[in-house]
């Protein structure tokens, strides 16, 4: 992409959205992102606007305050769904790791993993260890439950 001014041709820089998309493509292993990961690319308000536009276009899903998740198009419904191997629970654990919040498995998850129970924990939950974390992480109507 070049910008032509008279007889001179100047290379045109990438837009902020292109920079954010390139950063997302480079972090292919990650499924959840914090807003502060993109603040070095531009101003805070511009980054927020780009992320909101990407949510509207279905490239990202807003999971909470300053938290976004990668999406893919569902083969069943044709709508964007969270692209995380473990759904909201996996994305929530990744967000907690990025924020430096210590977490652990809940008692129901631990009992199922140790084969003490045959009940599969259905609702996404994480046990927070000694922290004042109080954000809500949600994908549509499904909310990550934080146990203390």
Image: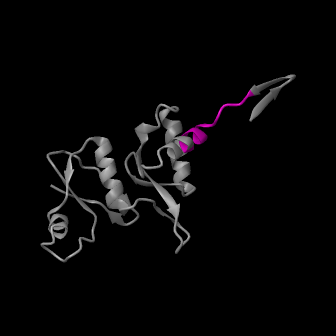
Q: Which residue is nearer to you in this view: 73 or 112?
A: 112
Q: Is residue 137 visible?
A: no
For the N terminus, the image quarter is: top right
Residue stretch in magenta = 11-21
Q: Per the image, is 19 magenta?
A: yes
Q: Is residue 64 left or right of residue 74?
A: left
Residue 147, horizontal then vertical, whole percent: 18, 58
- What residue lies at 76% left-to-right and 25% top-to-bottom? 10
Q: Is residue 43 visible?
A: yes
Residue 43, horizontal then vertical, whole percent: 51, 32
| Residue at the limit of the structure toward the left, as seen here | 116
- What residue lies at 42% left-to-right and 41% top-to-bottom? 35
Q: Per the image, is 12 magenta?
A: yes
Q: Height in image: 39 above or below 142? A: above
Q: Height in image: 47 above or below 122? A: above
Q: Is residue 137 left or right of residue 126?
A: right
Q: Is residue 97 left or right of residue 5?
A: left
Q: Quadrant of residue 21?
A: top right
| Residue at the limit of the structure toward the bottom, as seen here | 118
Q: Which residue is nearer to you in this view: 117 or 3?
A: 117
For the C terminus, the image quarter is: bottom left
- What residue lies at 36% left-to-right and 55% top-to-bottom? 91
Q: How is the image coloured?
A: one colour
Q: Quadrant of residue 87?
A: bottom left
Residue 113, horizontal then vertical, whole percent: 19, 67
Q: Height in image: 85 above or below 37? A: below
């Amino acid at each position: 992409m070049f910008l032509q001014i008279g007889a001179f041709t100047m290379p045109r820089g990438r837009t902020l959205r292109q920079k954010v998309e390139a950063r997302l493509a480079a972090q292919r292993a990650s499924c959840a992102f914090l807003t502060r990961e993109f603040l070095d690319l531009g101003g805070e308000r511009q980054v927020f606007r780009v992320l909101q536009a990407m949510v509207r276009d279905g490239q990202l899903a807003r999971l909470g305050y300053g938290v976004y998740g990668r999406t893919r198009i569902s083969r069943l419904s044709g709508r964007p769904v969270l692209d995380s191997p473990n759904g909201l629970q996996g994305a929530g654990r990744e967000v907690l790791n990025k924020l430096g919040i210590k977490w652990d498995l809940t008692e129901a998850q631990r009992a199922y993993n140790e084969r003490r129970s045959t009940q599969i924990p259905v609702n996404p939950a994480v046990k927070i260890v000694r922290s004042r974390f109080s954000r809500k992480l949600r994908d549509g109507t499904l909310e990550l439950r934080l146990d203390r």
